[in-house]
Image (cartoon, rainbow, N blue to C red):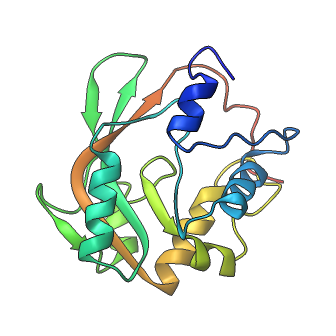
Amino acid sequence: VSQFISKKEVADFNIRLIHQDNQGVSVARNKGVAESKYNYVCFLDADDEWYPNFVSKINNLMTLYPNGNMYSLQHEVCFDNEKNTRNKCFYKNGFKGNVENFFKASMVGSIVNSSKVCVNKTEFTKIGGFPVGYKAGEDLFIWIELALKGKVIFDNTVCVRINVVSDDSRTGRGLSI
């Protein structure tokens, strides 16, 4: 399968790999959601990391607040493999619950991003999934749509590390389709 995960590990963890031609991140994510057999889907960008408590914390939020469109956890950022920096947040440490004003809270720090979110598959599908053809900001469309149509549940516990490398990998994306 790869140098990082064996075929046995894939089978043991109920992971299914999907191979397709590169058509962009939106097509890949939409295909993954369509192929999933459960009603909640988490995303993880290849260069980011979930801490060991990620799945249990998401599961806990879903148990405590079963009517969410999105469930999200706090993250920290690591630039160029240096020191981790906690994401700024509208909510105090220890907060867990419904995000009353997604837009106001998002102005202080990221409430949702693609490596720390779990979405309701049914609601995700109703809005048509990630917009195809965009090279940047495609995820913001989904987070805004899901926040407008239902509840966002957040736990301010750091469970994700976003790794950022200073290079030119994003410069060719542009803002147009």
Q: Nearer the viewer, residue 139 or 46?
A: 46
Note whether 89 is above or below 85 in the view shown.
Answer: below
Q: How many discs mark residues in the rendered view?
A: 0
Task: Specify the quadrant that holds the N terminus.
Answer: top right
Q: Residue 148: x, y in percent? A: 50, 83
Note whether 53 is above or below 154 in the view shown.
Answer: above
Task: Specify the quadrant that holds the C terminus.
Answer: bottom right
Q: Nearer the viewer, residue 147 or 41?
A: 41
From where the camera sits, is residue 21 visible? yes
From where the camera sits, is residue 98 visible? no
Q: Residue 21: x, y in percent? A: 88, 39
Residue at 70% in and 39% down: 17
Q: Nearer the viewer, residue 136 or 160?
A: 160
Q: Residue 147: x, y in percent? A: 47, 77
Residue at 66% in and 32% down: 170
Q: Residue 71: x, y in percent? A: 38, 65
Looking at the image, the residue that sits furthest to the right is 21
Residue at 42% in and 50% down: 116
Q: Nearer the viewer, residue 30 or 134?
A: 30
Residue at 53% in and 76% down: 146
* Left or right of 113, for residue 17: right
* Left or right of 8, for residue 56: left
